[in-house]
Every structure is written in structure tokens, then in C-alpha cells.
């Protein structure tokens, strides 16, 4: 039985530019044959059991030849597997996707093409260079600069291209930029014509340079720009200084480390990327359910008897309702007369997603805040359920019991330390900012470090904490905390990071 192959354009580098059709194909794929550039951040979207085959090319090194790529696609397709060929940019724009489609057609393997956004238009757009602009350019031409302009060529006629009106976009031309500029000038283009060079377009590493045809090669060498880059020749390049937007994002050019569990990292990572940051995800913990116990079973059996139910995290909410679901129960198991307390707005939102409205959300999103919010209530003899993580601080339970409450503390989940990818850890130590969202992330991160790494942290990333409890743990571990959220939420953490960046820029 023949399988099916999708030739998917990954776009130019920003993972948000992957199409919906591309995402659906990637999520369902059993085999993914991927390029080196423009696909790295999309691989986590693959099914955990998908087979990943690196077909990437880099200067002087090629993981798979084109013939080997074609053969792999045909082989897995004939074996009845769902395959994605994940290609940077668009499969049919200097991507050799046509050759891969020919090989599949010849072998009788069904396939489809999912177009991607080519760097030829995306990189200039992210740099504030429209390839067409009313009154400036009504057309654009895309050409590969891979061929040597100083030698006779049957495919690229630089003299003819010099005479073509409109914008000229050159891909893969950095290694021959000087010769290309000279050939265009010799063909009739003005030496003073604006040229834009965009390296690592659409990513947080993006760099932009605007020069002229006569100076661009020297300027690129001075600034140290290299591949991958898109070269834009034409008057539209001069618009970059006016309408460029990516460079204005407050975290552009900064690397920020997210240490949250992988399943929870996306909210923080997405916010940081939207602000221009290059995000290093280093999940130092994972959230694991605690094995069933008589205490857990008793609390769930008696859930309808509690008059106060306290949830101290999003994970606690998920863990509680997962246990209820195992028993064929849901939100209706909570008695309507019970007061449900959520430690913060994120926890309240997660409760709402399960069909429960939080009756009380304290002003301070810590255990002490919960106690303060209950200050006017008579808790003597009131049955209370506190569902939370193993190893949580004792202040909440101790405070409730001190006021006479009959508290059942149920530990439903725990934060388990995760081993770190060595490359990600090295990138984290070289980053600009290190974020911590809980004490467990601090302790697990520090446990990964050797003596030399701990010493290097003194001059390394600036530490941003989600709140005072996490900050205290960080200081106890020998870290200096440079910024602390005033609102103990993910948006509050991001605000603290932005304030730290702003204060240093204004200094």
C-alpha cells in the first residue's frame, strides 16, 4: 500500500509563518525529512514518535544528497507511511521540490505540495523593504546568486537582469556579492542604486544593512554579515529606515532562557518571541502525577463534603480533574455550597475551562495572599481541601489549621528534574536573560551546573523571577536576582524583563 508524501514549505525561519496546511501535515507525519535552515523550531510540532531524518546542507557538509533525499521519500512512501518533506522557504523556489515531485511521480507515490512563504519576499518585508511599492517599483525578479557572475553562464544573464526594471531579489548570493554588484553595474545599473542585505530574515537574529551597489560588498565585510541572507537591489531598499519594524521590538537581539516544563513553556515563549527575543527552551522540570494513595482516594471520595477547596496552581487544577476523570466524574462532584479558591488568574482560568468558577482570587498570588483573603471568615471546624504539588511550602496549610480548619492536604503532582540537552544548556549560559517561574525550576537548573558553570553565572545571564518565593530560592542557590515580577504571573514576569531591559538601556 502506498503512503502519502507532503512537500511542505516551512517558510523563512519565523515558525509563525508556517501555513495551517503545513502544520496539519507535520502533526500527522510518521516520517519527517527536514532541511537545516528554517525548520529547527518546527520540529517540536512533530508527533513524538515521528522518525526525523536530517537532510540539511551546510558549507562543506551535506547530510543527504539530493538523490538520497529522493530515494528516502520514495522508500517511505512505498512502505505506506505518511511523510513530510519539510523544506525551508517554498518547495518550488530554488528548493528542488520539483525534482522530488518528479521522483515521487515516477515511483507512483501519491503526494501534494504545500507552498511556503519564500524568503525572497518575507525577509525584505521583515526588514521594512517592500519588493514592490507604488511609484517606486511595480515588479520584482527573483534570481539565485549561486552561479559565478564572472564566468559564462547559460542560465543567469546578469547583463540582461541589469536592464530589467523593478526590484531584483538575489538569493544565495552572499559568497559572490562583489562579483554580482560589479556585473550589475557593468550591465547598466547605477553604482548609487540602493541595496538592502537581510541576514537571518524573520528570526530574532535578523540583521539589516542598506548600502549602494558600489559599496555593498565592502559594507557587508565591515559589518560581518554572511549567509543565509537575501539581497534586494532597487530604490525600495531605501525605505527600510522608514518602515522597518522588527528591529523596533523591545527584545530584538536578546536571548532569553525559558526553564518551565516543556508542556507549559509555550505561553511564555510565545510572548517573548512576539517581543523579538530569541528564546532558548531549557525545560529543567516536567510535571508528573503522584501515585494514588489512601489519602488521595479518601479526599476524592469525600469531595462533596468539603466547604473550602483551594487550588494553588494550574497544574493542581489539571491534576485534580484528571483524577476525577479516571473515576468517571467531573466538575459536578464539587458541592455548589463549597467556596473554591484559586491562587491567581491563570488558575482561575483553568478552573473555568473545567466548568468551575472560582469564588475567590486573592490580590497576592502566594499562599499568604490566600490566608489574607480568608481573614474575615470563621474557619473553625470547616472541612478544607488543599490540592497542590508535593513539597509545597507549609505556610498555607499551617495557617489554615492555626485558625481551626480541618485541612486535608492532598499532593497530586510533583515537579521532576529533567536532564538537559548540552547544547541548550550551553546556549542558556551564554544568554542575556534567564527566567524562573517557580522554585523547582531554580533548583533543577542549578543542579545541572558544575562548579565552573556556577562561577560563570556571575557574569552571565541576568536573572528574572516570577515572584519573591522564587527569588528567595534563587538567592539561596547563589544567584543574583536582577528583576522580580510585581504581579506573580507570566505577563508580570515579561513586564519585569522589559523593565530590566529598559533600565539598562536608559542607564
Image (tube, rainbow, N blue to C red):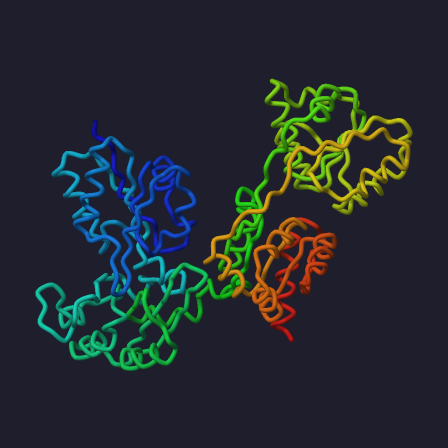
Q: Residue at x 52, y 62 (%)?
A: 255
Above or below, comparing residue 350 to residue 428 in the picture: above
Q: Residue at x 40, y 64 (%)?
A: 127
**Quadrant position of the C terminus in the picture:** bottom right
Above or below, comparing residue 101 to residue 496 in the picture: above
* Image location (x, y in percent) of residue 459: 60, 71
- Nearer to us in this view, 322 or 38: 322
Of all residues, the one furthest to the front in this rendering is: 451
* Image location (x, y in percent) of residue 257: 55, 57
- Nearer to us in this view, 326 or 203: 326
Above or below, comparing residue 485 to residue 236 in the picture: above
* Image location (x, y in percent) of residue 265: 55, 47
**Quadrant position of the N terminus in the picture:** top left
- Left or right? Give the position of 403 relative to 253: right
Q: Quadrant of residue 203?
A: bottom left
Q: Residue at x 67, y 56 (%)?
A: 465
- Nearer to us in this view, 422 or 7: 422
- Nearer to us in this view, 236 or 250: 250
- Left or right? Give the position of 239 relative to 191: right
Please tell me how many numbered marks the rendered image carries: 0
- Left or right? Give the position of 68 relative to 456: left
* Image location (x, y in percent) of residue 433: 58, 62
Q: Quadrant of residue 395?
A: top right
Amino acid at each position: 500500500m502506498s503512503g502519502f508524501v507532503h512537500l511542505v514549505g516551512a517558510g523563512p525561519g519565523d515558525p509563525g509563518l508556517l501555513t495551517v496546511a503545513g502544520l496539519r501535515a507535520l502533526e500527522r507525519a510518521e516520517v519527517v525529512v527536514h532541511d537545516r535552515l528554517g525548520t529547527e523550531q518546527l520540529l517540536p510540532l512533530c508527533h513524538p514518535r515521528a522518525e526525523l531524518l536530517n537532510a540539511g546542507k551546510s558549507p562543506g557538509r551535506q547530510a543527504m544528497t539530493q538523490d538520497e533525499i529522493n530515494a528516502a521519500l520514495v522508500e517511505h512512501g512505498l512502505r505506506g507511511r505518511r511523510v513530510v518533506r519539510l523544506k525551508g522557504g517554498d518547495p518550488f523556489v530554488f528548493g528542488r521540490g520539483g525534482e522530488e515531485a518528479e521522483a515521487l511521480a515516477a515511483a507512483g507515490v501519491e503526494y501534494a505540495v504545500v507552498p511556503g512563504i519564500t524568503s525572497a519576499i518575507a525577509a525584505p518585508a521583515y526588514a521594512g523593504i517592500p519588493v514592490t511599492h507604488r511609484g517606486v517599483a511595480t515588479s520584482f525578479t527573483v534570481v539565485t546568486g549561486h552561479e559565478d557572475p564572472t564566468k559564462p553562464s547559460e542560465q543567469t544573464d546578469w547583463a540582461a537582469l541589469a536592464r530589467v526594471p523593478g526590484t531584483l531579489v538575489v538569493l544565495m548570493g552572499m559568497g559572490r556579492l562583489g562579483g554580482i554588484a560589479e556585473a550589475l553595474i557593468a550591465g547598466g545599473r547605477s553604482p548609487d542604486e540602493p541595496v538592502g542585505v537581510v541576514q537571518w530574515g524573520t528570526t530574532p537574529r535578523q540583521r539589516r544593512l542598506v548600502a549602494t551597489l558600489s559599496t555593498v560588498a565592502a559594507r557587508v565585510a565591515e559589518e560581518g554579515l554572511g549567509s543565509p541572507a537575501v539581497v534586494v537591489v532597487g530604490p525600495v531598499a531605501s525605505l527600510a529606515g522608514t518602515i522597518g519594524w522588527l528591529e523596533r521590538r523591545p527584545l530584538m537581539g536578546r536571548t532569553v532562557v525559558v526553564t518551565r516544563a516543556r508542556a507549559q513553556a509555550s505561553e511564555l515563549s510565545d510572548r517573548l518571541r512576539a517581543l523579538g527575543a530569541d528564546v532558548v527552551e531549557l525545560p529543567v522540570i516536567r510535571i508528573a502525577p503522584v501515585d494514588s494513595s489512601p489519602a488521595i482516594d479518601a479526599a476524592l471520595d469525600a469531595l462533596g463534603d468539603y466547604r473550602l477547596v483551594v487550588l494553588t496552581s494550574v497544574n493542581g487544577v489539571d491534576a485534580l480533574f484528571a483524577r476525577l476523570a479516571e473515576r468517571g466524574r467531573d466538575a459536578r462532584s464539587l458541592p455548589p455550597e463549597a467556596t473554591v479558591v484559586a491562587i491567581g488568574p491563570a488558575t482561575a482560568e483553568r478552573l473555568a475551562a473545567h466548568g468551575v468558577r472560582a469564588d475567590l482570587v486573592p490580590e497576592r498570588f502566594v499562599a499568604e495572599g490566600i490566608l489574607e483573603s480568608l481573614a474575615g471568615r470563621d474557619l473553625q471546624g470547616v472541612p478544607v481541601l488543599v490540592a497542590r504539588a508535593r513539597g509545597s511550602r507549609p505556610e498555607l496549610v499551617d495557617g489554615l489549621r492555626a485558625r481551626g480548619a480541618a485541612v486535608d492536604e492532598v499532593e497530586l503532582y510533583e515537579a521532576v528534574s529533567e536532564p538537559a540537552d548540552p547544547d541548550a544548556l550551553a546556549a542558556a549560559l551564554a544568554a542575556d536573560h534567564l527566567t524562573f517561574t517557580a522554585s523547582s525550576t531554580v533548583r533543577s537548573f542549578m543542579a545541572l551546573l558544575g562548579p565552573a558553570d556556577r562561577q560563570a553565572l556571575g557574569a552571565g545571564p541576568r536573572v528574572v523571577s516570577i515572584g519573591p518565593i522564587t527569588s528567595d530560592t534563587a538567592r539561596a542557590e547563589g544567584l543574583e536576582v536582577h528583576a522580580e515580577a510585581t504581579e506573580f504571573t507570566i505577563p508580570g514576569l515579561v513586564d519585569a524583563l522589559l523593565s530590566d531591559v529598559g533600565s539598562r538601556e536608559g542607564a
